[in-house]
Amino acid sequence: QRYYRISRGTIQTQKGMEMTEGITQTEVLEDVLAWLPDTDGKVFDIEYAQRHFKIHGTNGTMHDKHILSQVLSSLKREGKLGGDRRGEYRFVDRELKPLDWVDADAGDILDIRWPYGWGDETSFGFDDNIALFPGNLVTVAGISNAGKTTFMQNLLVLNLDAWEQRGIRYLTNELNAPEFKDRMSPHAEFYELTDVFGVPRFEAATRYDNYQDVILPNGLNLIDWLDPGENPYFVGRQLKAISEALVGGVAFIAMQKKDIIIQDQQGHEKHIPSPYAIGGQYTVHLPRVVLHIEDNYLYVKKVKKWLKENPNKKRFSFQIIDEGAHFYNIRPYVEA
Protein backbone atom coordinates (compact mmCIF):
# COMPACT_ATOMS: atom_id res chain seq x y z
CA GLN A 1 0.00 0.00 0.00
CA ARG A 2 1.10 3.55 -0.65
CA TYR A 3 -0.13 6.53 1.34
CA TYR A 4 0.32 10.16 0.32
CA ARG A 5 0.21 12.90 2.91
CA ILE A 6 0.13 16.57 1.94
CA SER A 7 2.31 18.60 4.28
CA ARG A 8 3.17 22.26 3.56
CA GLY A 9 4.43 21.83 0.04
CA THR A 10 5.84 18.28 0.12
CA ILE A 11 4.43 14.79 -0.32
CA GLN A 12 5.66 12.19 2.11
CA THR A 13 5.23 8.58 0.92
CA GLN A 14 4.77 6.04 3.65
CA LYS A 15 4.68 2.29 2.93
CA GLY A 16 3.28 -0.65 4.83
CA MET A 17 0.28 1.19 6.28
CA GLU A 18 -3.11 -0.56 6.49
CA MET A 19 -5.24 1.94 4.56
CA THR A 20 -6.40 2.55 1.03
CA GLU A 21 -4.28 4.56 -1.36
CA GLY A 22 -4.70 8.31 -1.06
CA ILE A 23 -5.42 10.70 1.77
CA THR A 24 -8.46 11.37 3.91
CA GLN A 25 -10.41 14.61 3.90
CA THR A 26 -9.59 15.19 7.58
CA GLU A 27 -5.87 14.95 6.91
CA VAL A 28 -6.02 17.27 3.92
CA LEU A 29 -8.09 19.76 5.93
CA GLU A 30 -5.39 19.86 8.61
CA ASP A 31 -2.66 20.58 6.06
CA VAL A 32 -4.71 23.17 4.16
CA LEU A 33 -5.60 25.08 7.34
CA ALA A 34 -1.91 25.21 8.26
CA TRP A 35 -1.00 26.51 4.80
CA LEU A 36 -3.71 29.12 4.21
CA PRO A 37 -2.21 31.92 6.41
CA ASP A 38 0.90 31.79 4.20
CA THR A 39 -1.19 32.89 1.20
CA ASP A 40 -1.44 36.39 2.76
CA GLY A 41 -5.03 36.85 1.62
CA LYS A 42 -4.14 36.58 -2.07
CA VAL A 43 -6.69 35.03 -4.44
CA PHE A 44 -5.69 31.59 -5.74
CA ASP A 45 -7.29 28.77 -7.75
CA ILE A 46 -7.28 24.99 -7.45
CA GLU A 47 -4.24 24.64 -9.71
CA TYR A 48 -2.23 26.96 -7.48
CA ALA A 49 -3.11 24.80 -4.46
CA GLN A 50 -2.26 21.63 -6.37
CA ARG A 51 1.15 23.03 -7.32
CA HIS A 52 1.85 24.01 -3.74
CA PHE A 53 1.11 20.50 -2.50
CA LYS A 54 2.93 18.92 -5.46
CA ILE A 55 -0.12 17.06 -6.78
CA HIS A 56 -0.60 18.99 -10.03
CA GLY A 57 -0.42 17.35 -13.43
CA THR A 58 0.85 13.78 -13.25
CA ASN A 59 2.35 14.22 -9.78
CA GLY A 60 -0.84 13.36 -7.88
CA THR A 61 -3.73 10.93 -8.13
CA MET A 62 -7.27 11.89 -9.07
CA HIS A 63 -8.22 10.93 -5.52
CA ASP A 64 -5.77 13.46 -4.04
CA LYS A 65 -6.99 16.24 -6.34
CA HIS A 66 -10.64 15.46 -5.64
CA ILE A 67 -10.13 15.52 -1.88
CA LEU A 68 -8.25 18.85 -2.08
CA SER A 69 -11.04 20.37 -4.19
CA GLN A 70 -13.67 19.14 -1.72
CA VAL A 71 -11.82 20.65 1.22
CA LEU A 72 -11.45 24.06 -0.45
CA SER A 73 -15.10 24.12 -1.52
CA SER A 74 -16.22 23.16 1.98
CA LEU A 75 -14.12 25.91 3.57
CA LYS A 76 -15.61 28.42 1.14
CA ARG A 77 -19.16 27.40 2.05
CA GLU A 78 -18.29 27.80 5.73
CA GLY A 79 -16.98 31.32 5.12
CA LYS A 80 -13.39 30.46 6.02
CA LEU A 81 -12.44 31.10 2.40
CA GLY A 82 -13.65 33.92 0.18
CA GLY A 83 -13.49 34.39 -3.57
CA ASP A 84 -15.77 36.29 -5.92
CA ARG A 85 -15.83 33.74 -8.73
CA ARG A 86 -16.31 30.02 -8.96
CA GLY A 87 -13.02 28.19 -8.52
CA GLU A 88 -11.35 31.18 -6.81
CA TYR A 89 -10.33 31.15 -3.17
CA ARG A 90 -8.98 33.67 -0.66
CA PHE A 91 -8.06 33.09 2.96
CA VAL A 92 -10.38 35.06 5.25
CA ASP A 93 -8.31 36.34 8.18
CA ARG A 94 -10.58 37.70 10.90
CA GLU A 95 -7.84 38.20 13.46
CA LEU A 96 -7.62 41.81 14.65
CA LYS A 97 -4.78 43.61 16.37
CA PRO A 98 -6.48 46.08 18.73
CA LEU A 99 -5.14 49.63 18.97
CA ASP A 100 -4.72 50.83 22.54
CA TRP A 101 -5.20 54.42 21.41
CA VAL A 102 -6.72 55.72 24.66
CA ASP A 103 -3.52 55.19 26.64
CA ALA A 104 -1.17 55.90 23.72
CA ASP A 105 1.25 58.83 23.95
CA ALA A 106 0.73 61.07 20.91
CA GLY A 107 3.88 62.94 21.87
CA ASP A 108 6.09 59.86 21.70
CA ILE A 109 8.14 61.18 18.79
CA LEU A 110 11.43 59.43 18.12
CA ASP A 111 14.72 61.27 18.55
CA ILE A 112 16.31 61.18 15.09
CA ARG A 113 19.18 63.30 13.79
CA TRP A 114 19.07 63.67 10.04
CA PRO A 115 22.00 64.13 7.62
CA TYR A 116 23.13 67.73 7.14
CA GLY A 117 25.78 69.71 5.27
CA TRP A 118 29.23 68.89 6.64
CA GLY A 119 31.26 71.96 7.50
CA ASP A 120 28.71 74.52 6.35
CA GLU A 121 25.74 73.51 8.57
CA THR A 122 23.35 73.55 5.62
CA SER A 123 20.32 71.34 6.07
CA PHE A 124 17.43 69.51 4.42
CA GLY A 125 15.23 70.96 7.15
CA PHE A 126 14.21 67.57 8.56
CA ASP A 127 15.48 68.00 12.14
CA ASP A 128 12.77 69.27 14.51
CA ASN A 129 10.26 69.06 11.66
CA ILE A 130 9.70 65.49 10.44
CA ALA A 131 8.01 63.45 13.15
CA LEU A 132 8.55 59.70 13.39
CA PHE A 133 6.69 57.47 15.83
CA PRO A 134 7.65 54.05 17.20
CA GLY A 135 7.27 51.38 14.56
CA ASN A 136 7.57 53.72 11.57
CA LEU A 137 9.34 52.98 8.29
CA VAL A 138 11.37 55.41 6.18
CA THR A 139 12.45 54.57 2.63
CA VAL A 140 15.32 56.24 0.79
CA ALA A 141 15.18 55.39 -2.92
CA GLY A 142 17.70 56.23 -5.60
CA ILE A 143 19.56 55.02 -8.65
CA SER A 144 22.97 53.40 -8.20
CA ASN A 145 25.68 55.74 -6.85
CA ALA A 146 23.23 58.55 -6.15
CA GLY A 147 24.03 58.84 -2.44
CA LYS A 148 21.83 56.28 -0.66
CA THR A 149 24.69 54.74 1.30
CA THR A 150 25.99 58.21 2.20
CA PHE A 151 22.55 59.04 3.60
CA MET A 152 22.29 55.77 5.54
CA GLN A 153 25.78 55.98 7.03
CA ASN A 154 25.22 59.58 8.07
CA LEU A 155 22.09 58.42 9.90
CA LEU A 156 24.24 55.78 11.58
CA VAL A 157 26.96 58.05 12.96
CA LEU A 158 24.68 60.96 13.82
CA ASN A 159 22.41 58.76 15.97
CA LEU A 160 25.04 56.76 17.85
CA ASP A 161 24.62 58.64 21.12
CA ALA A 162 20.82 58.65 21.11
CA TRP A 163 20.32 55.03 20.05
CA GLU A 164 23.34 53.06 21.27
CA GLN A 165 21.57 51.76 24.38
CA ARG A 166 18.48 50.68 22.43
CA GLY A 167 20.58 49.06 19.73
CA ILE A 168 21.67 50.01 16.22
CA ARG A 169 21.86 47.47 13.41
CA TYR A 170 23.23 48.26 9.94
CA LEU A 171 22.43 45.58 7.34
CA THR A 172 24.16 45.65 3.97
CA ASN A 173 23.83 43.38 0.96
CA GLU A 174 26.60 45.10 -0.96
CA LEU A 175 29.64 45.94 1.17
CA ASN A 176 32.10 43.42 2.57
CA ALA A 177 34.10 44.13 5.73
CA PRO A 178 37.04 46.00 4.09
CA GLU A 179 34.66 48.08 1.96
CA PHE A 180 32.52 48.96 4.95
CA LYS A 181 35.57 50.03 6.95
CA ASP A 182 36.75 52.13 4.02
CA ARG A 183 33.38 53.88 3.79
CA MET A 184 33.30 54.50 7.55
CA SER A 185 36.92 55.65 7.92
CA PRO A 186 36.20 59.35 7.14
CA HIS A 187 33.72 59.35 10.05
CA ALA A 188 36.16 57.81 12.53
CA GLU A 189 37.99 61.12 12.95
CA PHE A 190 34.86 62.87 14.21
CA TYR A 191 32.71 60.15 15.80
CA GLU A 192 33.55 57.45 18.32
CA LEU A 193 32.60 54.36 16.34
CA THR A 194 33.96 51.98 19.00
CA ASP A 195 34.04 51.98 22.79
CA VAL A 196 37.19 52.19 24.91
CA PHE A 197 37.81 48.48 24.36
CA GLY A 198 37.58 48.77 20.58
CA VAL A 199 34.15 47.14 20.39
CA PRO A 200 31.83 48.70 17.77
CA ARG A 201 29.00 50.77 19.21
CA PHE A 202 26.65 49.34 16.59
CA GLU A 203 26.13 46.08 14.76
CA ALA A 204 27.04 45.73 11.08
CA ALA A 205 26.12 42.58 9.19
CA THR A 206 25.51 41.19 5.72
CA ARG A 207 21.90 40.33 4.91
CA TYR A 208 20.12 39.62 1.63
CA ASP A 209 16.52 38.76 2.50
CA ASN A 210 13.99 38.06 5.28
CA TYR A 211 14.99 41.23 7.10
CA GLN A 212 12.02 40.91 9.42
CA ASP A 213 13.79 38.03 11.16
CA VAL A 214 16.71 40.21 12.29
CA ILE A 215 15.00 43.52 13.02
CA LEU A 216 15.73 45.09 16.41
CA PRO A 217 12.16 45.65 17.66
CA ASN A 218 13.07 48.69 19.75
CA GLY A 219 16.24 49.79 17.99
CA LEU A 220 17.46 51.78 15.02
CA ASN A 221 17.51 49.56 11.93
CA LEU A 222 19.31 50.62 8.76
CA ILE A 223 18.85 48.41 5.69
CA ASP A 224 21.18 49.22 2.80
CA TRP A 225 19.55 48.13 0.53
CA LEU A 226 16.32 46.11 0.17
CA ASP A 227 16.34 43.79 -2.83
CA PRO A 228 12.74 42.84 -3.77
CA GLY A 229 13.93 39.68 -5.51
CA GLU A 230 12.58 38.14 -8.70
CA ASN A 231 9.11 39.65 -8.27
CA PRO A 232 9.48 43.35 -7.42
CA TYR A 233 5.80 43.64 -6.56
CA PHE A 234 6.40 41.51 -3.47
CA VAL A 235 8.18 44.50 -1.95
CA GLY A 236 4.97 45.62 -0.25
CA ARG A 237 4.85 42.29 1.55
CA GLN A 238 8.50 42.71 2.59
CA LEU A 239 7.89 46.19 3.98
CA LYS A 240 4.83 44.95 5.88
CA ALA A 241 6.85 42.14 7.46
CA ILE A 242 9.54 44.60 8.59
CA SER A 243 6.90 46.94 10.00
CA GLU A 244 5.26 44.12 11.96
CA ALA A 245 8.64 43.23 13.50
CA LEU A 246 9.02 46.72 14.97
CA VAL A 247 7.71 47.74 18.39
CA GLY A 248 9.34 50.90 19.70
CA GLY A 249 12.04 51.16 17.07
CA VAL A 250 12.31 52.46 13.53
CA ALA A 251 13.63 51.18 10.21
CA PHE A 252 15.33 53.21 7.48
CA ILE A 253 15.36 51.26 4.22
CA ALA A 254 17.36 52.12 1.11
CA MET A 255 15.80 51.01 -2.17
CA GLN A 256 16.90 50.98 -5.78
CA LYS A 257 15.31 52.99 -8.59
CA LYS A 258 15.45 52.34 -12.30
CA ASP A 259 17.67 54.70 -14.27
CA ILE A 260 15.43 55.80 -17.14
CA ILE A 261 17.44 57.30 -20.01
CA ILE A 262 15.93 58.79 -23.16
CA GLN A 263 17.41 60.69 -26.09
CA ASP A 264 16.24 64.13 -27.13
CA GLN A 265 15.90 65.27 -30.73
CA GLN A 266 19.58 66.21 -30.84
CA GLY A 267 20.61 62.72 -29.70
CA HIS A 268 21.63 63.82 -26.22
CA GLU A 269 20.92 61.46 -23.35
CA LYS A 270 18.48 62.67 -20.73
CA HIS A 271 17.77 61.04 -17.38
CA ILE A 272 14.10 60.83 -16.41
CA PRO A 273 13.42 60.24 -12.70
CA SER A 274 11.31 57.17 -12.04
CA PRO A 275 8.30 58.08 -9.86
CA TYR A 276 8.79 54.99 -7.68
CA ALA A 277 11.45 52.67 -6.37
CA ILE A 278 11.60 49.18 -7.87
CA GLY A 279 8.30 47.68 -6.77
CA GLY A 280 6.14 50.57 -7.93
CA GLN A 281 3.40 52.11 -5.83
CA TYR A 282 3.73 49.36 -3.22
CA THR A 283 6.93 51.08 -2.05
CA VAL A 284 5.10 54.19 -0.81
CA HIS A 285 1.94 52.84 0.86
CA LEU A 286 3.34 51.83 4.24
CA PRO A 287 6.38 54.09 4.93
CA ARG A 288 5.68 57.32 6.79
CA VAL A 289 8.54 59.08 5.00
CA VAL A 290 9.59 58.48 1.39
CA LEU A 291 12.71 60.22 0.06
CA HIS A 292 14.14 59.96 -3.45
CA ILE A 293 17.77 60.75 -4.21
CA GLU A 294 18.29 61.57 -7.86
CA ASP A 295 21.40 62.51 -9.84
CA ASN A 296 21.83 65.90 -8.25
CA TYR A 297 18.99 66.49 -5.82
CA LEU A 298 16.90 64.98 -3.03
CA TYR A 299 13.12 64.90 -3.49
CA VAL A 300 10.71 64.65 -0.55
CA LYS A 301 8.00 62.43 -2.00
CA LYS A 302 6.03 61.78 1.17
CA VAL A 303 5.99 62.88 4.80
CA LYS A 304 2.93 61.94 6.85
CA LYS A 305 3.62 64.05 9.94
CA TRP A 306 5.52 67.30 10.25
CA LEU A 307 5.79 69.76 13.12
CA LYS A 308 6.51 73.13 11.53
CA GLU A 309 6.64 73.40 7.75
CA ASN A 310 5.18 71.03 5.16
CA PRO A 311 8.20 69.41 3.47
CA ASN A 312 6.25 67.42 0.88
CA LYS A 313 7.34 67.90 -2.76
CA LYS A 314 10.41 69.92 -1.79
CA ARG A 315 13.69 69.39 -3.64
CA PHE A 316 17.21 70.04 -2.44
CA SER A 317 20.45 70.20 -4.38
CA PHE A 318 23.58 68.96 -2.65
CA GLN A 319 27.17 67.87 -3.12
CA ILE A 320 28.81 64.76 -1.70
CA ILE A 321 32.38 65.20 -0.46
CA ASP A 322 35.12 63.33 1.43
CA GLU A 323 35.01 60.20 -0.72
CA GLY A 324 31.27 59.78 -0.36
CA ALA A 325 31.17 60.40 3.39
CA HIS A 326 29.40 63.74 3.76
CA PHE A 327 26.75 65.97 2.25
CA TYR A 328 27.74 69.56 1.56
CA ASN A 329 26.14 72.78 0.30
CA ILE A 330 22.53 71.68 0.68
CA ARG A 331 20.22 74.24 -0.91
CA PRO A 332 16.82 74.54 -2.63
CA TYR A 333 16.87 72.86 -6.02
CA VAL A 334 16.61 75.13 -9.05
CA GLU A 335 15.54 73.56 -12.35
CA ALA A 336 18.24 74.02 -14.98
Image: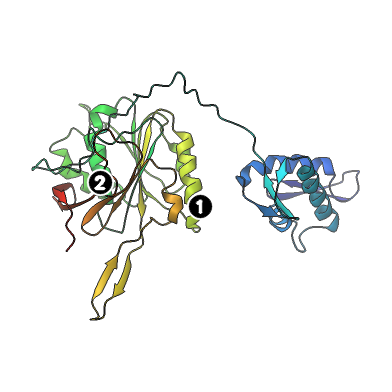
Is residue 323 at all visible to an observer of this figure?
A: no
Residue 108 image label: none
Q: What's the amino acid at mark 1?
A: Phe
Q: Residues within 10 Å of mark 2 (few under 14, many from 20)?
A: many
In the image, residue 324 sits, relative to residue 244, either above or below, namely: below
Residue 209 place in picture, x, y as percent? 46, 48
Q: Residue at x 30, y 59 (%)?
A: 144
Q: Quick one: quadrant of the C terminus? A: bottom left
Q: Residue furthest top?
A: 103
Marks 1/2 in contact by CB < 8 Å: the verdict is no
Q: Nearer the viewer, residue 233 or 22?
A: 233
Q: Nearer the viewer, residue 227 or 250?
A: 250
> Is 291 placed left or right of 83 in the picture?
left
Residue 278 place in picture, x, y as percent? 41, 57
Q: Residues within 10 Å of mark 1 (few under 14, many from 20)?
A: some
Q: How many marks?
A: 2
Q: Residue furthest bottom?
A: 266
Residue 131 place in picture, x, y as percent? 31, 33
Q: Residue at x 18, y 44 (%)?
A: 185
In the image, residue 65 sits, relative to residue 326, either above or below, namely: below
Q: What's the amino acid at mark 2?
A: Phe
Residue 151 image label: 2
Q: Residue furthest front?
A: 309
Residue 35 place in picture, x, y as percent? 67, 43
Say which element carries label 2.
Answer: helix
Say which element carries label 1.
Answer: helix
CA–CA distance in space, label 1 to label 2: 25 Å
Is residue 137 at all visible to an observer of this figure?
A: yes
Q: Residue at x 77, y 47 (%)?
A: 72
In the picture of the structure, the residue carrying the numbered disc 1 is: 234
